[in-house]
Amino acid sequence: MSTAHRPRPNPVDTDIDTDVLVVGGGPVGMLVAAELALQRVRVVVVETRAELDQRPRAGTVHARSLSLLARRGYLPSATSEAIQRDPHGVRRSPFQFAAQPVLMISAPGVEPGPIAGIPQARLEAAFEERAGHLGARILRGHTVTGLEADDDAVVAEVAAETGHRSLRIRARYAVGTDGARSLVARIGDFPAQVYPATMNAIAGLAVTAPDGGVPPGWHPTPSGWTLHNPNPHGPARIIAMDFSGALDHRPEPDAREYRQRLEYVLGAPPALSEISHLTRFSDHGRYRTRLRDGRLLLAGDAAHSHYPLGGQGLNTGMQDAFALGWRLARVITGHDRPAVLDEYSRERVAVAAAVVANTVLQSRMMNPRQPELRAAMLAMLAIPAIHDAVAQLISGQFQSGFQHDLVVVEADGGVRTLTELLRAGRFVAIRPDEHVPVPHAPAGAITVTGKVTPDQAWTCALVRPDGYLAGTW
């Protein structure tokens, strides 16, 4: 994943007319922009931060996200030779549930893998680079201060960080990827299912001596948990999770409160230095019960926010971006009716509901005052069928209809993988010979003819740009 060069910002006009305005340029917003720009849709991203956010955030990328990233060339995929050599192989990696090492995440050997550690900032940089290279306008250091939507367009008032420049952006659609306090969500009609917070936590980077009082890894105490990811080369990520209750107010954390929170959880003051990049979170859970209101759409934390365990928020957000990008592009270019955006909403709300529910459960299991719940759930996870279902949920693979990678050997001897065919973000039609039509293949679909490895339950298939099956015959 190349992140060596960041696209240079576009010059700012007083008024901008575009197809899509993306409000919020974190990893999900940048990925939405890259997906739209890949389809030659005009897109503008407005992001308040002038630089990448380097605070310790999600760093776990799960199986379904790895597959989607490989299909756009952000990550390497299995080679055709590897797929043909071991078409039914499986790879496994251990993982935690509610801070307990009880899961084994598996993924087909034809896919990139079950889990990878990739910092969120690195993903954001790669998506921004791709979006800029494809022509997206990226306005860092700018904030949307006002937004109006009607039946014809969305109009945003935007202020520059310096305060010396303001502009107006008119777009056909606006996508809110502007976090849990989303302006786009407040402007539109986006009902929500809410789970109130029961705990509070602070994460940060700090240096601690080997005997500094913060054990490595997950550490339970009578008051909560700590998580320490040791770094022998500098500041490490250290999190204090306090289960004494939720906070009534949430000011920006400082080093003093960070030390106090760790001391309360550990029962003794930690020996820390070089504290930085502090961020606060809780187990508050919320998902919007619809993600489209006319010309306004939501994705990422604006659509769903929850207890940050296992990187599920980042992964679900990236999957939102892949599910939304091609649909919105087809509406913009006139190849589909706006109703496909309601399909996006239904599909992703169901996913968000499942993800938020499992994080709420994990928080309850981690509460030191609920040991009976933790013991009962761990006993259930020892049952193979329950374990496998939970592992599929955490890894994103519970979403049905995904077509795993395969090889097509054409009559002329050419060999192509599905991942390679999906690189351009178009529909892919697969058939055994040229006399067999693939029903409902849209204009512009890539059609490939030949023998498929591994064997599939279908004879012909139409694969969506995001890798899910649109139909089989």
Image: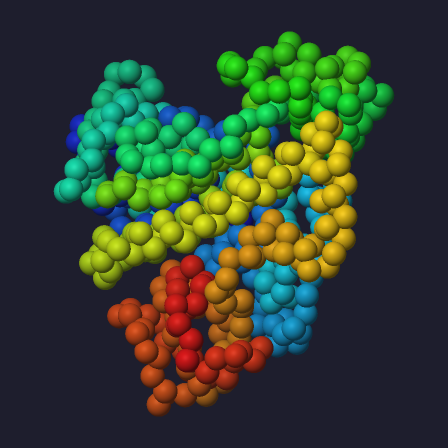
At x 20%, y 35%, the residue is: 149
Which residue is the extreme one toward the left? 152
Q: Position of residue 126 (x, y in %)?
A: 48, 44
Q: Which quarter shows the C terminus?
A: bottom left
Whether residue 90 can be seen here: yes
Residue at 32% in and 78% down: 439
The picture quadrant where one finds residue 147 is top left
Depth check: give the residue in front, 229 or 51.
229
Q: How is the image coloured?
A: rainbow
Foreground pick, 289 / 58: 289
Q: In the shown orientation, is residue 12 left or right of residue 409?
A: left
In front: 110, or 14?
110
Q: Estimate the x, y position of residue 169 in percent, counting from the top left.
A: 21, 33
Residue 282 point in image, percent of width and height: 57, 27
Q: Can residue 138 be seen from the camera position used here?
A: no
Residue 394 versus residue 264 in the image, above or below: below
- When the figure is inspected, residue 56 is found, relative to residue 313, above or below; the finding is above
Q: Quadrant of residue 109?
A: bottom right
Q: Is residue 455 left or right of residue 29?
A: right
| Foreground pick, 244 / 84 | 244
Q: Seen from this angle, which residue lies furthest top?
A: 256
Residue placed at 40% from the left, 36% from the top? Answer: 192
The residue at 64%/52% (across/down) is 390
* Image spot of residue 124 (x, y percent): 48, 39
Residue most extreme to the bottom? 435
> How many marks overall?
0
Q: Is residue 9 above or below residue 130?
A: above
101 on left or right of 424: right
